[in-house]
Amino acid sequence: MAAPNYQASDFAAAIHALMPRGLVWPRDPTAVQAQVINGLAPTWVRHTQANNQLLVDAFPATSVELLPEWESTLGLPDPCAGSSPTLQGRQQQVVARLTNSGGQSVPYFIEYARTLGYTVSVAEYTPFRMGQQAMGDQLGGPDWAYTWSINAPLASLTSFRMGQSAMGEPLESWNNAVLECELSEIKPAHTVLLFTYGLGDLDTTFVLDESTLG
């Protein structure tokens, strides 16, 4: 059964029908009473439309009116998204935090970034070891055992989408600030996380040595 889709005229007619009878309750459409009722009817139309969208709006991935409630629960919005974050970006950040189950593996970080709307690959590094590296390889000290990097496109585009974007948002926007903030927050505390952009095949996870992140 489809949700009711009442118009302002439907509400106005219903209210008129509920009014008392008598000389002081005129049915003339030009009377003050009719004008007041016609002025109030659009309010109930908006309420009905909001009620029809309640189930859709209750889920963070599609939430609009309830999105500030989700954000308040999760400590969002944060400065990472800038002063004018897109609706899609806000929804993705809420979903990422709600569904984050924790982890330290390469697939975990790739999936977390994907939930935020970014396609990334991971590179892990290792100190230079005699007998294990070839001549010409870069020298690296012990700290490289705890260093890893996220590689993402130079411009991770967010396109305007009908039904998913808000009026007034740009047709295209790009910003990697949310990616850097979110992953820097959840990275293992003993590691150093670097960010590189526009390098390599993003469909491949680059592992330069055995995993140091678990």
Image (cartoon, helix red, strand yellow):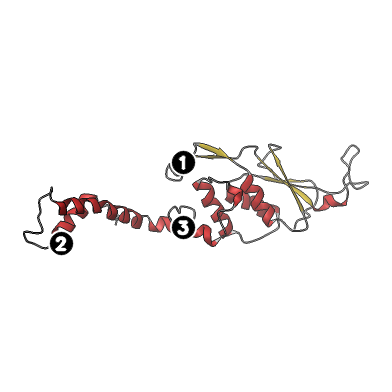
Please state if 71 lies on the left or on the right of 184 as rendered.
left
Local crowd at mark 1 within 10 Å, few (<14), some, or many (≥20)?
few
Secondary structure type for disc 3: loop
Residue on which disc 3 sits: 59
Q: Amino acid at mark 3?
A: Phe
- Identify the residue at image location x=40%, y=58%: 55
Q: Amino acid at mark 2?
A: Leu
Please state if 14 lies on the left or on the right of 118 as rendered.
left
Viewer-closest of 33 and 184: 33
Q: Depth-wise, is mark 3 or mark 2 nearer the camera?
A: 2
Disc 1 from disc 3: Cα separation: 18 Å
Q: Are marks 1 and 3 in contact (CB under 8 Å)?
A: no
First in sequence: mark 2 vs mark 1: 2
Q: Are marks 2 and 1 in contact (CB under 8 Å)?
A: no
Q: Amino acid at mark 1?
A: Arg
Report x, y in % for residue 91.
Answer: 51, 51
Q: In the figure, residue 18 lies in which quadrant?
A: bottom left
Disc 3 from disc 2: Cα separation: 37 Å
Report x, y in % for residue 105.
Answer: 70, 56
Residue 18 is marked as 2
Report x, y in % for residue 125.
Answer: 80, 47
- Residue 4 showing in the rendered view: no
Q: Quadrant of the N terminus?
A: bottom left
Q: Depth-wise, is mark 2 or mark 1 nearer the camera?
A: 2
Secondary structure type for disc 1: loop
Viewer-closest of 201 and 6: 6
Residue on which disc 1 sits: 161
First in sequence: mark 3 vs mark 2: 2
First in sequence: mark 1 vs mark 3: 3
Disc 2 from disc 1: Cα separation: 43 Å
Q: Quadrant of the C terminus?
A: bottom right
